[in-house]
Image: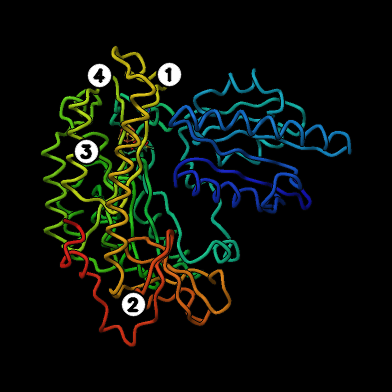
Amino acid sequence: MNGARKVHIKSFGCQMNVYDAFRMADTLAPEGFAETATPEDADLVILNTCHIREKATDKVYSELGYLRLLKQAAAAEGRRFTVAVAGCVAQAEGKEIIRRAKTVDLVVGPQSYHRLPDLITRAERGERVIDTEFPLEAKFDALKAPSRDATRKRGVSAFVTVQEGCDKFCTFCVVPYTRGVEVSRPVEKIVAEVARLADAGVREVTLIGQNVNAYHGDGADGRAWTLGMLLHRIAEVPGIARLRYTTSHPCDMDESLIAAHRDLPALMPLLHLPVQSGSDRILAAMNRRHTRADYLAVIARARAARPDIAFTSDFIVGFPGETEADFGATLELADAVGYSSAYTFKFSARPGTPAADMPDQVAEDVKSERLQRLQQAIDRQYAKFRAQCVGRTFDVLFERNGRYPGQLAGRSPYLLPVQVMAPSSLIGDVAPVTITEMSANSLFGVLAKDGADCQVAGLAEAGALD
Ligand code: SAM
Ligand code: SF4
């Protein structure tokens, strides 16, 4: 493949897909593909799909309807327009997509992205290609690293995949089927990737994986390292000011990870810890492998290690067999923890998962009503959390110019967006900011006079996390 052509990659779903989209773009760049933000002027469009809930899958087919029109227009102009479907829908429904959507030239599963250049060449020759194998070769080794330029354009905060796949088999979830078994990348490969990012100006790294705290990658010492050990090692990379990780399973919050929260100032005091339900009966039916008490014990251990830590979570309402009493237990648990925010979902029956065939499926209107009640409870917690930020001083990582001249946009340790009047030379710096007011979506603040004012621990003292 040669010449300057354009690729548009549209991602749906989780951070894993955001990271994968960058790596696909990096792998196609040496083949002459420049990225474009719109499908209309692209030669190749890749839909990087999500299969986690029915709605996410439906979006792919509606998007393909629009791409069919673009393909017809390109054909009328004598231009080639190649359409690829990647991600978890590709993995789960490969043959079905090729059958249903004639527009699609290529279906590629998440484990085959390193083979994209070859697959695209075949598709451009007129073959309708499906590659949804779980190949034995190491995908991460074969994917191309981003150029310094590409990294700079992507900003000061980056994702790094450290682990992929899942062996937990929660009864509602497609991930073990679409992403395969748990695989962890070796420690030194991850450290080298982080060092490259830091060298190009990245200051914050979020380690990602479907089950990131089940990380058990090979260390240079021949041992399997835990996520806690990995975080300690990455904190030593010069230039890296902030660390985060997501998504974690409550059963894998081991002592080394709790200790990392206690010992590493660079590890931000925010833990995304999905609980799904507050009812032991439902947790067992979900095969979550922990009870409500186990979950609350993890929260208590994390708080003891890092008193200013805040929590976010994922909840599913209307799992098969969920009664009003089970749902009440979920509301009580949310209240007991006091989240800074959370994602709430209606149970979506996914073909092939055990929960899809369970008896006592909950009626749609009941699910909607419970979702609304839980969302209202979470919204109240979010509003309280944000309100308690006003008047406090936090370290803010400045990410980019703000919406108005002279304004910078950054993030607090708790990931809340913060707008500050400050010179753009501060982009990439971490500086203390006193929060003066808030709007529906942002906090506003002023640069604090010196770092000594910084009191990230203030939230816990103020009872924001009660
Ligand atoms: N590994 C994470 C964990 O153990 O919680 C979750 C990963 S999953 C990609 C993200 C979230 O999607 C889950 O936490 C769950 O709340 C939600 N989810 C997964 N399958 C679902 C389904 N069938 N219906 C509704 N929500 C679902
Ligand atoms: Fe899905 Fe997370 Fe359960 Fe794995 S642990 S099966 S990714 S919900």
Q: Quadrant of the N terminus?
A: top right
Q: Residues within 10 Å of mark 2 (few under 14, many from 20)?
A: many
Q: Quadrant of the C terminus?
A: bottom left
Question: In the displayed structure, does residue 456 sit left or right of residue 403?
Answer: left
Q: Can you tell which mark lies on residue 331?
A: 3
- The image shows residue 137, relative to residue 15, as above or below, that is above
Badge 4, how many Cα within 10 Å: few under 14, some, many 20+? some
- Callout 1 amino acid: Pro
Which residue is drawn at the image coordinates 28% and 59% (left, top)? Answer: 385
Q: Earlier in the sequence, mark 4 or mark 1?
A: 4
Callout 3 amino acid = Leu
- Determine whether the beta carbon of the residue marked 4 sits less than 8 angstroms from the nearest atom of ligand 1: no
Query: Gap in Å between the C-alphas at discs 3 and 1?
Result: 28 Å
Q: At 53% across and 32% down in the image, what residue appears?
A: 109
Q: Which mark is residue 434?
A: 2
**Element type where label 4 sits in the image:** loop
Assign a secondary structure to mark 1: loop
Numbered circle sitting on residue 321: 4
Real-space CA distance between mark 4 and mark 3, rounded to the nearest whole angstrom = 17 Å
Asked if disc 4 and disc 3 are in contact, CB closer than 8 Å, the reply is no
> Which residue corresponds to mark 1?
351
Q: In this rendered view, identify the residue nearer to me: 348 or 106.
A: 348
Tag 4 near tag 1, CB within 8 Å: no
Residue 368 in the image: state x and y as whole percent: 37, 29
**Marks 4 and 2, how far apart in space?**
48 Å
Image marks 3 and 1: residues in contact by CB distance under 8 Å: no
